Image (tube, rainbow, N blue to C red):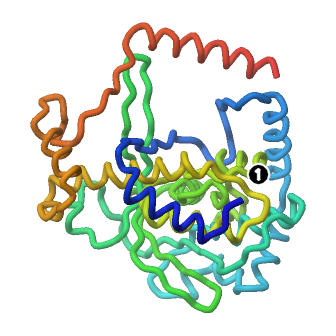
Amino acid sequence: MAGPSQLLWGVALFLVFDLTEILVSIGFSEVAGHISYVQFQPHMEIEMKKLQAVRRTLSGASVEPILAALGEFVDVEELFHIASRHDGYRDGGCIAGQAVSSAVQDLFFGGRGGVYNDVDCFAPAAGHHFESTEVRSRVKTVQMADVVGEVDYEQINARVVPRYRVLSSSRMDKLNLVQIDEYARNKPIELTASILRSFDFNCVQVGIDLVERKLVWTPAFERFLATRQIEVESTHTPAHTAIRLAKKLGELENVYVDQDRVFRTLAGAIMRLKVAEAHTERGKGQKDEMIASLATLGASDPRSAMGTLYGQRRFGKLLAQKARDNELNTFTLFLAL
């Protein structure tokens, strides 16, 4: 497995030289803690059995030993009563991220975690939530959203679903307290699920809900535990994610990643952001001739909505029928397992 320095060099090469393919990563919406439809490579039955075993273990896991493990680093109980301990917060949110993932692995999956750099707590701000119609250019905070893939067998589309925004982050010893604001007031467990889905890696998409006192996870986290394969689940910050990936591979033991595919995806996301940005005030000073020419091409193409780069998204009748047949065959095989 390549070391962190080699990976960082690989990141640089991809970001500079390999921006010729538009490979935008689209995440398909899933409900935390459940899974409905999954395809595996050649040993599907073996992988499905692993996945089912992982799910049973997670479903039966108590949060108390996890909280006890995290309690060695932070005052966990104060996080369950954060409104009375810290100004500007209301109770709720979750403890989530690498420390929770490490505790889950150490306690229930053979001690494969071991990384406790800090404990991340995401807590909602007191006061009213903000509206999704708020002018984006006036929001000076980080906003998180899901990009949901939608397929109707004639074409594939992406729909952006706003989740929350980060208002502030403060570090107190080992505690990283992140204050968030929601687009809409969700049920506590739904807010936790939204937070987990916004994380960039599958290996950290697990948390403890601070209202329900329950363990919550995504199907992507199940797949990580079953395969030890790190996947990028969100490309909100592709350059930062590439660097974080190198760091993860240096910290975590016995994990795998398809570096070429992952870095191509991140490089494609960066290029797509640059093309979109070329049509904004911020992008008027774009000096990359290739990006500028692609943006101009997209703007002059009548098929290109809002002046962005046009890409084929229709399947055609023949491929649409193949997609329908493939789903039926795969679903039948899934039921037979």
User: In which quarter of the view is residue 37 placed?
Assistant: top right
- Left or right of residue 60, residue 211 in this image: left
User: In which quarter of the view is residue 286 placed?
Assistant: bottom left
Q: Secondary structure at mark 1?
A: helix
The extreme right residue here reads: 110
- Left or right of residue 288, residue 330 in this image: right
Q: Which quarter of the rendered picture does the C terminus lie within? A: top right
Q: State the residue at coordinates (79%, 72%).
A: 114
Tell me: residue 170, above or below residue 312.
below
Residue 320, position in %: x, y?
Answer: 45, 13
Question: On the image, numbered disc 1 is attached to which residue?
Answer: 225
Q: Amino acid at mark 1?
A: Leu
- Left or right of residue 206, residue 294 in this image: left
Tell me: residue 271, above or below residue 245.
above
Q: State the residue at coordinates (67%, 62%).
A: 2
Tell me: residue 198, above or below residue 127.
above
Q: State the residue at coordinates (44%, 26%).
A: 151
Asked whether residue 68 is in view, the answer is yes
Query: For this rendering, which residue is in front, 214 or 69?
Result: 69
Residue 141, position in %: x, y?
Answer: 33, 71
User: Mark 1 packing: few (<14 Cα in 10 Å), some, or many (20+)?
Assistant: many
